[in-house]
Image (cartoon, helix red, strand yellow):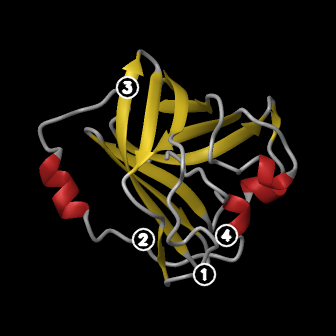
């Protein structure tokens, strides 16, 4: 997120398309030798807002045909939100300040295809995404910690923290 992913989803309700991956080869070569505790490709399968079921509006962003996913390779992460009319991507650097905690700091602005298809296109999150994470079997659960730029819940009138459950892609 990337986690994520995890930005003002309510602002991109009309988005979708194909995935952006202009820097994939560069990212792969930069991080080929490094690994992370959450290495892999992850797809959101469920979420909770403030301990409650997330609204239908929030869950629409990861319910087929839409998807919300992220990948981690070493210290690099790419979050991708795909809807019928827009693909929103955010690349981040990941750090692990303590066991079970991950911080995703944006490397630049949200990229969109087509350009301008979401309100977040071209904007850069002003604070990092901080998560507490736990591996559960083959899956992953990530919960926002403290202030977050992710408006997946608050954008629909619900409260934080946000808890995402992921399955491997």
Q: Residues within 10 Å of mark 3 (few under 14, many from 20)?
A: some
Q: Earlier in the sequence, mark 1 or mark 4?
A: 4
Give 160 or 149, whichever is nearer the viewer: 149
Residue under circle 1? 85
The percent position of residue 15, horizontal first and vertical second, equals 63, 75
Q: Residue at x 59, y 50 (%)?
A: 6
Q: Earlier in the sequence, mark 2 or mark 1?
A: 2
- Is 84 left or right of 157, judged from the image as shown? left
- Is 150 left or right of 37, judged from the image as shown? right
Residue under circle 3? 96
Mark 4 and mark 2: Cα distance apart in space: 15 Å
Q: Are marks 3 and 4 in contact (CB under 8 Å)?
A: no
Q: Is residue 128 above or below residue 64?
A: above
Q: Earlier in the sequence, mark 1 or mark 3?
A: 1
- Is 82 left or right of 111, judged from the image as shown? right
Q: Residues within 10 Å of mark 1 (few under 14, many from 20)?
A: some
**Disc 4 or disc 2, which is closer to the eye?**
4
Residue under circle 2? 19
Q: Residue at x 44, y 40 (%)?
A: 104
Q: Earlier in the sequence, mark 3 or mark 4?
A: 4
Residue under circle 4? 12
Q: Residue at x 73, y 53 (%)?
A: 59
Mark 2 and mark 3: Cα distance apart in space: 27 Å
Q: Residues within 10 Å of mark 4 (few under 14, many from 20)?
A: many
Q: Earlier in the sequence, mark 2 or mark 3?
A: 2
> Quarter of the image holding residue 64?
bottom right
Mark 1 and mark 3: Cα distance apart in space: 34 Å
**Disc 2 or disc 3, which is closer to the eye?**
3
């Amino acid at each position: 997120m990337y986690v994520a992913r995890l930005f003002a989803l309510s602002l991109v309700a009309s988005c979708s398309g194909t995935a952006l991956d202009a820097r994939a080869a560069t990212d792969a070569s930069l991080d080929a030798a490094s690994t992370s505790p959450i290495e892999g490709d992850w797809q959101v399968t469920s979420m909770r807002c403030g301990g409650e079921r997330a609204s239908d509006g929030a869950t629409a962003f990861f319910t087929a045909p839409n998807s919300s996913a992220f990948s981690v390779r070493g210290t690099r992460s790419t979050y991708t939100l795909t809807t019928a009319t827009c693909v929103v991507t955010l690349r981040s650097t990941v750090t692990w300040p303590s066991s079970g905690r991950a911080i995703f700091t944006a490397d630049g602005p949200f990229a969109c295809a087509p350009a301008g298809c979401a309100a977040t296109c071209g904007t850069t999150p002003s604070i990092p995404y901080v998560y507490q994470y736990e591996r559960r079997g083959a899956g992953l659960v990530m919960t926002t910690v403290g202030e977050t730029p992710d408006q997946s819940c608050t954008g629909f009138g619900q409260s934080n923290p946000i808890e995402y459950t992921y399955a491997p892609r």
